[in-house]
């Protein structure tokens, strides 16, 4: 269930659309309740619910707080996988405050996506933002190919450098992209195409599922960047 609701603010009033109104009813909200709203662009609103309608609702803003974005940008690029795992991955990456999620099709991806699924992935991110009261919804894209320029790219690889050795180095980076392959691993050809543009890093000797690897690496990076 959501801990916040998506709102559209105008003056001292917030409006909630039909989807959010349904959530209000599921949560048994009533006029007079004090609730939390987010706009997905950095502002958190505290408001009193004034009207609970059939297809829309409204409230009076009692406090608003804009959360400044830091000067860092973290992207996670992950090979498409089966829907239950991909959904969890997007949820947890959003909860951990990632700035952008890129999904791509690898040779060994067991499930393949195209751009028509972007809206579905974004919906998952929005629901996770509401649950975690994350004031910003990450960008979500389904990519046909990588665009690795302009960022420090980290490739998860058993043979890579131990992530614990890179804290000082990564803490100075402003634009990081973490690339996570499918559970069957990248092909040798894919690895060859990526390694000359990436720093290979290792999370240790255990074989982690895709969603677990994303949670672990984003948690570590958040610590390195001072986001925790």
Image (cartoon, rainbow, N blue to C red):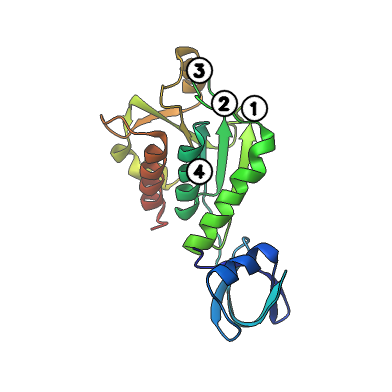
Give the vertical position of 7 relative to 219 (above or below).
below
Q: Which residue is mark 4?
A: 87
Q: Nearer the viewer, mark 2 or mark 4?
A: 4
Q: Residue furthest left?
A: 205
Real-space CA distance between mark 2 and mark 3, rounded to the nearest whole angstrom? 11 Å
Q: Secondary structure at mark 2?
A: loop
Q: Earlier in the sequence, mark 3 or mark 1?
A: 1
Callout 3–callout 4 Cβ contact below 8 Å: no
Q: Residue 144 bears which disc, if any? A: 1
Label 2: few (<14), some (14–19) or many (≥20) C-alpha neighbours in 10 Å = many
- Residue at 34% over, 44% down: 167
Q: Nearer the viewer, mark 3 or mark 1?
A: 1
Real-space CA distance between mark 2 and mark 4, rounded to the nearest whole angstrom? 16 Å
Q: Which residue is mark 3?
A: 190
Q: Earlier in the sequence, mark 2 or mark 4?
A: 4
Callout 2–callout 4 Cβ contact below 8 Å: no
Between 133 and 57, the one nearer to me in the picture? 57
Q: Earlier in the sequence, mark 2 or mark 1?
A: 2
Real-space CA distance between mark 2 and mark 1, rounded to the nearest whole angstrom? 7 Å
Q: Earlier in the sequence, mark 3 or mark 4?
A: 4
Residue 135 percent coordinates (x, y): 56, 63
Q: Which residue is mark 2?
A: 105
Q: Secondary structure at mark 3?
A: helix
Between 189 and 114, the one nearer to me in the picture? 114
Q: Earlier in the sequence, mark 2 or mark 3?
A: 2
């Amino acid at each position: 269930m959501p801990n916040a609701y998506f709102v559209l603010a105008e003056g001292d009033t917030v409006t909630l659309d039909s989807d959010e109104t349904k959530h209000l009813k599921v949560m048994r909200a009533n006029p007079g309740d004090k609730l939390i709203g987010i706009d997905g662009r950095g502002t958190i609103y505290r408001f009193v619910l004034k009207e609970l309608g059939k297809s829309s609702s409204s409230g009076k803003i009692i406090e608003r707080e804009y959360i400044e974005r830091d000067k860092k940008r973290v992207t996670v690029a992950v090979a498409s996988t089966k829907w239950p795992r991909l959904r969890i991955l997007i949820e947890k990456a959003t909860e951990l405050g990632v700035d952008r999620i890129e999904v791509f099709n690898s040779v060994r991806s067991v499930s393949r996506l195209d751009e028509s699924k972007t809206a579905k992935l974004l919906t998952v991110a929005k629901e996770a933002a509401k649950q975690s009261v994350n004031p910003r919804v990450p960008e979500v894209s389904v990519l046909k190919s990588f665009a690795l320029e302009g960022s420090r790219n980290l490739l998860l690889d058993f043979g890579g450098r131990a992530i614990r050795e890179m804290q000082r180095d990564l803490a100075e980076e402003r634009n990081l992209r973490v690339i996570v392959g499918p559970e069957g691993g990248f092909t040798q050809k894919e690895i060859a195409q990526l390694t000359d543009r990436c720093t290979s890093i290792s999370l240790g000797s255990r074989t982690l599922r895709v969603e677990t690897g994303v949670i672990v690496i984003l948690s570590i990076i958040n610590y390195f960047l001072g986001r925790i």
